[in-house]
Amino acid sequence: STSREDPDTVYPGDGPNCQRRKAFHARIRDDYNTVLSGVLAEYQAAGLLENAEYVDIFDIRFESEHVNGGDCFHPSTAGHALMAEKQWCRSIWGADDPACSP
C-alpha cells in the first residue's frame, strides 16, 4: 500500500501502531541523525575517525518488495540491498564506481 511505502505521511486508515512507527521514524530522521552527524564531526575535528563518513539515506523510498512482510516496517532482504547500494553510491568510496552511474 502507499502508506507502507511512505514512512513520512500519516494516511487515513493508518492505525495507532502505524502512526506510532511513523512518528518514531520522523524522530530518527529529524533528531537522531542530526546528533549522529554532529558527533562524527566532533571526532573528525579531533583528528579521529578519519575514514568515517556520514551518509544520509533517509530520502530513499521503498517499494513493496523492500518492506519486510512480517512486521511491515523493517526492510526485507531486497530493502537491505537497496540501502547498501545507496549508502555505497553516496559515499566518497563509491563516487567513481561505474555501478553507481545513473
Image (cartoon, helix red, strand yellow):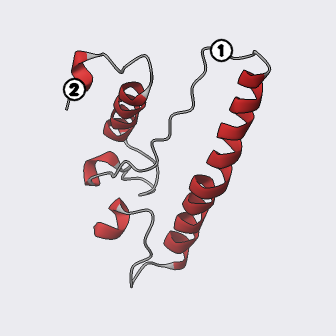
Q: Which mark is residue 101?
A: 2
Q: Quadrant of the N terminus?
A: bottom left
Residue appearing at x 44%, y 76% in the figure: 10
Q: Position of residue 26 (x, y in %)?
A: 56, 62
Per the image, the residue denoted by label 1 is 50
Q: Earlier in the sequence, mark 1 or mark 2?
A: 1
**Amino acid type indicated by mark 1:** Glu
Taking the image as shown, residue 14 lies to the left or right of residue 53, namely left
Taking 92 as reference, is 42 above or below it?
below
Name the residue type under label 2. Ser
Q: Is residue 13 left or right of residue 18?
A: left
Q: Nearer the viewer, residue 99 or 76?
A: 99
> Residue 71, how many percent across, how many down?
45, 56
Q: Closer to the camera, 70 or 55?
A: 55
**Residue sitting farthest toward the front:** 45
In the rendered image, residue 54, in percent from the top left (x then y), is placed at 57, 32
Name the residue furthest right. 46
- Residue, x 58% and y 70% (percent of image)? 20
The image shows residue 57 at horizontal and vertical percentages of 45, 42
| Residue at 44% in and 25% down | 91
Q: Quadrant of residue 90?
A: top left
Label 2 packing within 10 angstroms: few (<14), some (14-19), many (20+): few
Q: Secondary structure at mark 1?
A: loop
Give the residue displayed 60% in from the left and 14% down from the top.
51
- Dot 2 falls on a residue whose secondary structure is loop
Using the image as rendered, state which of residue 18 and residue 8 is in the foreground: 8
Q: Which mark is residue 35?
A: none
In this view, 72 is above or below 98: below
* Disc 1 to disc 2, C-alpha distance: 26 Å
Left or right of 31, for residue 2:
left
